[in-house]
Image (cartoon, rainbow, N blue to C red):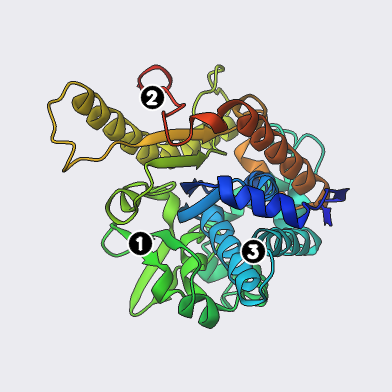
Amino acid sequence: MKRGGVRQPRKSADAVGNAGNEAKTVNLALQGGGSHGAFTWGVLDALLEDGRLQIEAVTGASAGAINAVLLAEGWRRGLAADGDPREHARERLHAFWTELGRQPSPFALASAWPFATATGLANPVLQWLDVVSRLWSPYQLNPWKINPLRASVDHHVDFDALRAAPPFKLFLCATNVRTGRMRIFRETELELDMPLASACLPFVFHAVEIKGEHFWDGGYLGNPALWPLFYTTQSRDLVLVQINPLVRDEVPDSATEIAERVNEISFNASLLHEMRAIDFVQRLLNEKKLDPARYRRVLLHMIASEDTMRRFGASSKYNTTPAFLKQLFELGRASAIEWLEAKYEYIGHAGTVRVAEQFL
């Protein structure tokens, strides 16, 4: 089966069966980041192909929420067809991202400008679009509420069927415009507007209205939200797919670079807060200062490629050209394969992220 132009080997029935017997159950946390969500597509493709992970729940924001819904829909279709749910999930993700790469958009054309995948500084088209978006809102520039994601997501997901038979728990994070509070949409209430709300950038799209409330991108308050997993799941293992760089060694000195770094810091703030809270609780459990019957131990893991991802500026999150999406896909696959080889044995036994050293 082709994935991003590269033919991947299909597992035999025996291999799938053996993988199922060895499967370890985890929760997945998928970050948002525009077209950089293709990195997560690659990660999921490799994890599904490997076949040793069973999923209890997925939490996601923005592009992470869309990937979560596609993953669940593909898995559901596989179960409904008495087929391999992992292969169906791979196919659903592949179909969506391939179609996205074929859709024309002014942001894709601008991001395709030379050097746009770096900082965007040499991209006058993208700079002009940025200025326009700050002078005129989507309500003025796009009174027809055109959202290219709507038709694409609707085409690839049967929300009625997914809502009726979700294969695992889903938590999609969005930001309530009126209250400024986080809203978590669950798998039992899923409708098309919910992943679109989670991926609604306020300078690009109209706020998404759901039952009288309006929502913006979930990444502002949870990228993604981790806390729902602690109250509703049994698995202690949490695998975070990180696509937004946390650290940059160089101090930004241009208006574009400063705006991009502020954007990264803002979208990582809530995640860092939750990771610090996790670390605090784990230390108290280790010191026997908390009741383990009331507070659970969380084994945190992370799949990332920060050294490579930090080379791409925030402007490249609008780049949906097929070549760029394929590059991110392949990077995600390679990162997941490397992680499986190095960290899989720790699942169920120990966390592999040292929060105190890496994030405090």
Instruction: Between residue 232 and residue 359, name the one nearer to us.
Output: 232
Q: Regarding mark 1 in the picture, which secondary structure is present there?
A: strand
How many dots with numbers?
A: 3
Task: Write down the residue under mark 3.
Answer: 85
CB-based contact (under 8 Å), mark 1 and mark 2: no
Residue plotted at (41% across, 22% down): 354
Q: Is residue 111 left or right of residue 358?
A: right
Amino acid carrying label 3: it is Pro
Amino acid carrying label 1: it is Ile
Q: Where is residue 175 drawn, in percent x and y?
A: 37, 59
Q: CA distance from mark 2 to mark 3?
A: 33 Å
Q: Which mark is residue 203?
A: none
Q: Quadrant of residue 357?
A: top left
Residue 33, can we see it? no
Query: Is residue 268 placed above or below 79 in the rendered structure?
Result: above
Q: Please rate how many residues cluster around mark 3, counting C-alpha atoms within 10 Å: few if below 14, some from 14 to 19, many from 20.
A: many
Q: Where is residue 116 drawn, in percent x and y?
A: 74, 38
Q: Regarding mark 2 in the picture, which secondary structure is present there?
A: helix
Q: Is residue 126 left or right of residue 54?
A: right
Residue plotted at (23% across, 32% down): 281
User: Which is closer to the viewer, label 1 or label 2?
Assistant: 2
Q: Quadrant of residue 59?
A: bottom left
Residue plotted at (45% across, 26% down): 353
Task: Write down the residue under mark 2.
Answer: 355
